[in-house]
Image (cartoon, rainbow, N blue to C red):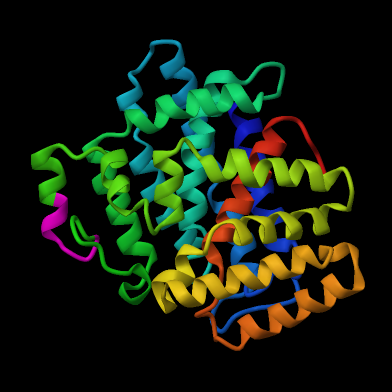
Amino acid sequence: MESLISRCGVLASLLEVSAYPKPGNVHRLYDMPGTRYEHFLAGGVAIEPYLREAARRGFEASRGVRGWDELEIGRLIREAVEETLRWQRGGNVNLGILLLFAPIAAAAGTVVEMGRVEAGRLRSALGRVLRGATPGDAVEVYEAIGTAMRPETLGEAEELSVLDEDSRRRILEEGWSLLEVFKLCSGYDSICYEWVTDFQLTFEVGYPALRRNLEEVDVNDAIVETYLTLLAHRPDSLIRRKCGLERALEVSEMARGVLEAGGLGTMEGRRLLEEMDEALRRGDGALNPGTTADLTASSIYIMLLEGWRP
């Protein structure tokens, strides 16, 4: 059971990074300076043991063996980040994925039956996992973020900043849960937004789009169109932190234009997609919709847990 859940997570990360062309992202035909496609493949493999442990701990919590506040989601995320950095030299390739996948894996461990997980039950279980995360988990996640990300890509928080060493002490002394910490930044960070909405973007935007797309086009095109749907729906957090909201909105408008032209199903849609990819590449990584890629991966993860196979 745990192995099934963890392997679905690994496959989701590999399918997401392999889909092309996802404008502005690393994919099988495009590398960024210092970060290559192979680095993402290695990162996808590195996270497997931690997803497996999260699934096991979720199962144990559902059986009363441990409390929901004893899942140690934060530790698993931190250790998975550290392991990822040992497996490849391309830097941070999956912090956002881990922040999404670790609670999904734990929740899946509570509701898996006959090798499958029903999406509605998974989301209900996910709420218990998210609300069980403790101040200790928050500090562990801060450590993971500090390890994985450069200060210039973090942005500035008004309160409890990752860049402020005193924040960790405050979190523990004042009893801030990880969910409460993420509420502070949920207005401008989509990963935090997912935590405080029981993964609204994944379950209500990305997953339905992917399910629909897979009925109409091949796996690669379905993933790219899901990515575009998510990007059109919400400005990318990473671009917003690096370049500001106005540029993030411009990129979302590009994605909307591709979809309105028919996406990968029309010559015009493909032409606009290629133009968009070239435009975002010129930003030397500044216009990389990395958070949207993470949300695409979590959408794929749900499909795989439900039993879909490529």
What residue lies at 84% left-to-right and 63% top-to-bottom? 262
Q: Quadrant of residue 178?
A: top left
Find the magenta span and give its range.
162-168
Q: Quadrant of residue 85?
A: bottom left
Q: Is residue 108 left or right of residue 91?
A: right
Front-most of residues 261 and 192: 261
What residue lies at 78% left-to-right and 35% top-to-bottom? 308
Q: Is residue 93 left or right of residue 189?
A: right
Residue 26 appears anywhere in the view: no
- Percent position (x, y) of residue 131? 34, 29
- Percent position (x, y) of residue 157? 25, 62
Q: Is residue 227 above or below residue 101?
A: below
Q: Is residue 274 left or right of residue 218?
A: left
Front-most of residues 115 and 241: 241
- Percent position (x, y) of residue 172? 14, 42
* Quarter the C terminus occupies: top right
- Within the magenta stretch, is there residue 163? yes
